[in-house]
Image (cartoon, grey):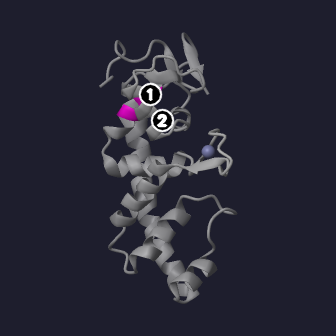
Amino acid sequence: MATDNSTAVQNASFRSAHSALVSAFQISGEEYELAEKNKLTSTTDWPLGMGLTGTIREVVSELGTLFEAALIARIAPKTFICKCGAPTCLGHKTNREWFDAISLLSNYVQDVETNAELRALYVERHFTMSGLRESIDDIAMMGEINRQTAEQQFNQVSGLLDEIESHAQEAITDALDSAGLIADQIGSGAVYH
Ligand SMILES: [Zn+2]
């Protein structure tokens, strides 16, 4: 693991952990694994290229699956634009990592008393922007429970996730900083925004 500056990517740094993750997660896990398997060295359409994308993904994964899931669910896109060109293509494809993260986190909040399907809906709602997410009313209707119950259950789930997210944010900021990837001052090297 790149925990010291000598193995970190030369002179590359980010304004924040958030900006590093936004860039790294623009490449799907599948696409990254495929590139790694085929030993690609040139990935011109990747915002960070192979090396830096891999380094950031590795730092995230070393935080453990729970923190990794929290960061992916918050920052990785739910879908990617698809350029496959197939006539049946919808123009986008789902991000499997995002859905895996939702599923892991739904399991994490299993002490909230409700059924698995509703837990997953609450977790998905927590990580989806207002305007795009399911309303509490719709979730209550789907689960055939009353609105107040749904709201209470959602708030419990959301509270647990907030806690995990804040620990995960702290951990990734420290880890990327130790890897020499966070810009601590205006100065040498490229700073990604
Ligand atoms: Zn496609």
Percent x, y for residue 56? 43, 31
Residue 161's quadrant in the figure?
bottom left
The part of the chain drawn in magenta is: 53-58
Main SS class of the magenta portion in the image: helix
Q: Which residue is mark 2?
A: 31
Q: Are marks 1 and 2 in contact (CB under 8 Å)?
A: yes
Ligand 1 image-quadrant field: top right
Disc number at residue 35?
1
The location of residue 44, given as percent across then percent down, is 58, 20
Q: Is residue 77 left or right of residue 176?
A: right
Q: From the viewer's side, name the closer residue of 30 and 66.
A: 30
Q: Is residue 63 above or below residue 175?
A: below
Q: Amino acid at mark 2?
A: Glu
Residue at the spot 53% in from the left edge and 22% down from the top edge: 43
Confirm or reject: label 2 Cβ below 8 Å from ligand 1: no
Disc 1 residue lies near ligand 1 with CB under 8 A = no
Taking the image as drawn, is residue 56 in sight?
yes
Front-lying residue, 62 or 84: 84
Callout 1 environment at 10 Å: few (<14), some (14 to 19), or many (20+)? Answer: some
Quarter of the image that includes the N terminus: top left
Local SS, label 1: helix
Q: Amino acid at mark 1?
A: Ala
Q: Residue at x 56, y 27 (%)?
A: 46
Q: Residue furthest top?
A: 188
Depth order, front residue of 131/117: 117
Q: Quadrant of residue 45?
A: top right
Locate residue 9, reporting x and y percent: 43, 16
Q: Residue at x 40, y 24 (%)?
A: 38
**For the residue carrying disc 2, how many other residues have a C-alpha within 10 Å: few (<14), some (14-19), or many (20+)?**
few
Q: For the C terminus, which image quadrant?
A: top right
Q: Secondary structure at mark 2?
A: helix
Residue 24 higher or lower than 143, as above or below: above
